[in-house]
Every structure is written in structure tokens, then in C-alpha cells.
């Protein structure tokens, strides 16, 4: 017997990440090859954006995906999020010319307050939310705070792109297959301050740290390369990462929904005080997932260098949180 379709809302659906994401969700790469989906797509009311969305929908139809049980176009989060089981919040306000960081935070605070309220009002009571739109951690925090009737733990931010970037750099350094790397962690904010931590990582059971054995490479090559990868892609492509971001969003949601089989992955999630991070800070942590729930990998020793890195990314997140507190 075929499964009942689940509802997947995607915002910014006519944008570049949307274009790299929707076809993969509809083909079953996110929730499984036996799980029908109904796509509830949100774009801004602007005529150009709505027209672009119509074009994307025509293409989705033309793929004739057997798992695609319905497609809806929306311009209002109150209808787009109705009964949704999964929400991927991709659309956000990009930084415009002359826009200060505070203006960017404020513009996005408005979007994510409204979307959090709409999720609170109309989404499934167990909706799982992934925020991709930047600043992702703070936007996820705002949405969570705007949805007091939903479980706070169901609001997450995307750190998976940083995790995948870190794995790929390590694989290149060691000369191993990226899929053989386990127990990698990324702590903190999706920003250049993130701390990609390979102290516990293994390749086929062998310690990555011992194999690399080069603190200078870690501090002065690896961390800046992973941290500044987004900017490097913008400089090279003239546009921000899209296919790799969509891929990370698929990885994040698939692992959350279907489980990781004991493998560590990184998710930005609201802290409950783990590792000394103040409660509610939306922080990247190593987690495992099972039965549709994530669980933080606890009890890892934090050395002085790691603590310094964690303090730096936490300070940035707390600064962002302070910058929006008057808007909540
Ligand atoms: P894009 O500009 O191509 O598309 C964004 C789309 O969102 C646009 O079509 C726009 O009309 C729409 N949009 C804007 N505000 C909206 C709203 N309130 N409701 C619904 N739709 C809205 O951008 P993109 O390349 O797809 O990137 C989207 C976001 O993802 C950006 O904020 C980008 O910085 C971020 N990003 C995050 C990561 C990550 O790892 N967390 C990685 C890459 C990009
Ligand atoms: C990325 O990490 O690729 C993006 O977050 C960069 C950006 O600013 O959109």
C-alpha cells in the first residue's frame, strides 16, 4: 500500500536554491523513494517572482515525478504553511547596496517573525523546520521565538553545508573517500566563525587528527578555507552557492526524518545548555538522528583551542540575537 503524502513547504521557491532543491524533493531524495509529497511553494507577491514560480511549477509537472502528489503556489505564508509537515525556509532578504548588517538583520527579522507566526497558526503541530536563508541561525531563532505553540526543538538552522565542506577538505588532505569520514562536528554559527572540529573524526576507524597531525594546517588553512568557502564561491560564480546548499538541505532533512544509523551529522539546533551554550541559542552541534528525532553527541572533551573557537562563534551569535531582540 502506498504511503499517505506529506506536505513540504518551501519558501523562496523561485530562487536559485529552490531550483536546485525542488526537483530532488519531488523525486524522493529527501524523504524516501516510497514517500509521496505535496509541494507548497511560497514566493513574494511580486509579479516577476510569481511568474518565475509558475515556470518552475510547469517544469515540475513536466518531470512527471510519480511521488509528486500535488503542487501549490502561494504568496502568503498563512496559506503556504497550512498543515505542512516539513518547512524549508530558503527565501530571505539579501544584503543590498549600502545596507548595514543591522538593516539586514531587521529586514530578515520581519520575514522570519511573520513566517514563524504563520507556522504557529497553521502548520502541522509536529512540523519540522529548516532555515537556510541567511543569517540562518538567527532567522531560525526568530522563527522559533515567533511560534510558541510549536516544539522549539523542531526549529533548526542549516550547518550541513559547512559540515560537508569540512569533510571534503579533509578527504582531499588525507587522500581518502569523503564517505569514509565519520564523527566530524561543526560548532556554532553558519558564518566564517563556525568551528569545524575533526578531533574525533575517523577514516576507516583511524584518527583524522593523528593522520593529519598539523595544528598549523588546521588553524591557518582548513578553518579559514571552510569558513570563507561561501565568499569564495560568490567571488568565483558571481552568485552564492546554490546546488551545494540545496544538497545540504536535502541531507539535513533526510537524515532528520530517516535517521543517520549512528553516524554524526551537524545541525543548528536550539541549545538546552549543552557544552555551556546558553539555552535557546541556535547553535551548530554534532548530532545523531533516529526515529525522526535528533540527539546531541554529548560528553566530548573540549580543549583550550576548541573552547576559544566555540567562544568566538557563540559571541557572534549572541551579538546577532541582541541585534534583533527589540524586534521580537
Ligand atoms: P535567490 O535570491 O536566488 O532566491 C531567494 C528567493 O527568495 C527569491 O526568489 C525571492 O523572491 C524569495 N524571497 C525573498 N523573500 C521572501 C519571503 N519573505 N517569502 C518567500 N520568498 C521570499 O537566493 P538563493 O541563492 O536561493 O539563496 C537563498 C538564501 O539562502 C539566501 O539568504 C542565501 O544567503 C542563503 N544561503 C544559505 C546557505 C546556508 O548554508 N545556510 C547557503 C547558501 C545560501
Ligand atoms: C554559503 O555559505 O555559501 C552562503 O551562506 C553564502 C551567502 O552569503 O549566501
Image (tube, rainbow, N blue to C red):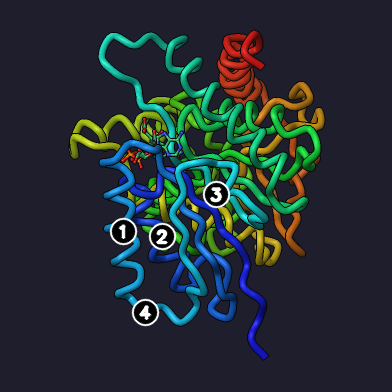
Q: CA distance from mark 4 to mark 1?
A: 13 Å
- Asked if disc 1 and disc 2 are in contact, CB closer than 8 Å, the reply is yes
Which labelled disc corresponds to residue 22? 2
Which labelled disc corresponds to residue 64? 4
Label 3: which secondary element? helix
Residue 162 visible in this rendered orientation of the protein: yes
Q: CA distance from mark 3 to mark 1?
A: 16 Å
Which residue is label 1 attached to?
56
Q: CA distance from mark 1 to mark 2?
A: 9 Å
User: How far across and how far down the image is residue 294, in percent?
Assistant: 73, 52
- Res 276 quadrant in image: top right
Q: CA distance from mark 2 to mark 4?
A: 13 Å
- Res 218 quadrant in image: top left
User: How far across and how far down the image is residue 33, in percent?
Assistant: 53, 78
Which residue is label 3 attached to?
80
Q: Earlier in the sequence, mark 3 or mark 4?
A: 4
Amino acid at each position: 500500500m502506498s504511503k499517505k503524502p506529506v506536505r513540504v513547504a518551501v519558501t523562496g521557491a523561485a530562487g536559485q536554491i529552490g531550483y536546485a532543491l525542488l526537483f530532488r524533493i519531488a523525486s524522493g531524495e529527501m524523504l524516501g523513494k516510497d514517500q509521496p509529497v505535496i509541494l507548497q511553494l511560497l514566493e513574494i507577491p511580486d509579479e516577476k517572482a510569481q511568474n518565475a514560480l509558475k515556470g518552475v511549477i510547469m517544469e515540475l509537472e513536466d518531470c512527471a515525478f510519480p511521488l509528486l502528489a500535488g503542487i501549490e503556489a502561494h504568496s502568503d505564508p498563512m496559506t503556504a504553511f497550512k498543515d505542512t509537515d516539513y518547512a524549508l525556509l530558503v527565501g530571505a532578504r539579501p544584503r543590498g547596496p549600502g545596507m548595514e548588517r543591522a538593516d539586514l538583520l531587521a529586514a530578515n527579522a520581519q520575514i522570519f517573525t511573520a513566517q514563524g507566526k504563520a507556522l504557529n497558526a497553521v502548520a502541522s503541530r509536529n512540523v519540522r523546520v529548516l532555515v537556510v536563508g541567511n543569517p540562518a541561525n538567527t532567522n531560525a531563532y526568530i522563527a522559533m521565538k515567533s511560534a510558541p505553540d510549536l516544539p522549539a526543538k523542531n526549529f533548526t538552522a542549516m550547518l550541513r553545508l559547512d559540515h560537508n565542506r569540512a569533510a571534503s577538505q579533509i578527504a582531499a588532505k588525507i587522500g581518502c573517500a569523503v564517505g569514509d569520514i565519520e564523527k566530524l562536528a561543526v560548532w556554532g554559527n553558519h558564518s566564517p566563525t563556525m568551528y569545524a572540529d575533526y578531533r574525533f573524526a575517523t577514516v576507516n576507524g583511524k584518527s583524522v587528527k593523528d593522520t593529519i597531525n598539523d595544528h598549523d594546517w588546521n588553524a591557518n588553512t582548513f578553518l579559514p578555507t571552510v569558513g570563507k568557502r561561501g565568499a569564495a564561491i560568490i567571488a568565483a560564480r558571481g552568485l552564492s552557492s546554490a546546488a551545494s546548499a540545496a544538497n545540504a538541505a536535502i541531507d539535513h532533512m533526510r537524515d532528520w526524518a530517516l535517521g543517520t544509523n549512528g553516524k554524526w551529522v551537524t545541525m543548528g539546533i536550539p541549545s538546552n545548555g549543552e557544552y555551556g551554550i546558553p539555552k535557546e541559542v541556535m547553535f551548530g552541534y554534532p548530532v545523531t538522528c533516529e526515529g525522526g528525532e535528533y540527539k546531541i553527541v554529548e560528553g566530548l572533551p573540549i580543549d583550550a583551542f576548541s573552547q576559544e573557537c566555540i567562544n568566538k562563534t557563540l559571541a557572534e551569535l549572541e551579538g546577532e540575537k541582541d541585534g534583533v531582540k527589540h524586534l521580537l
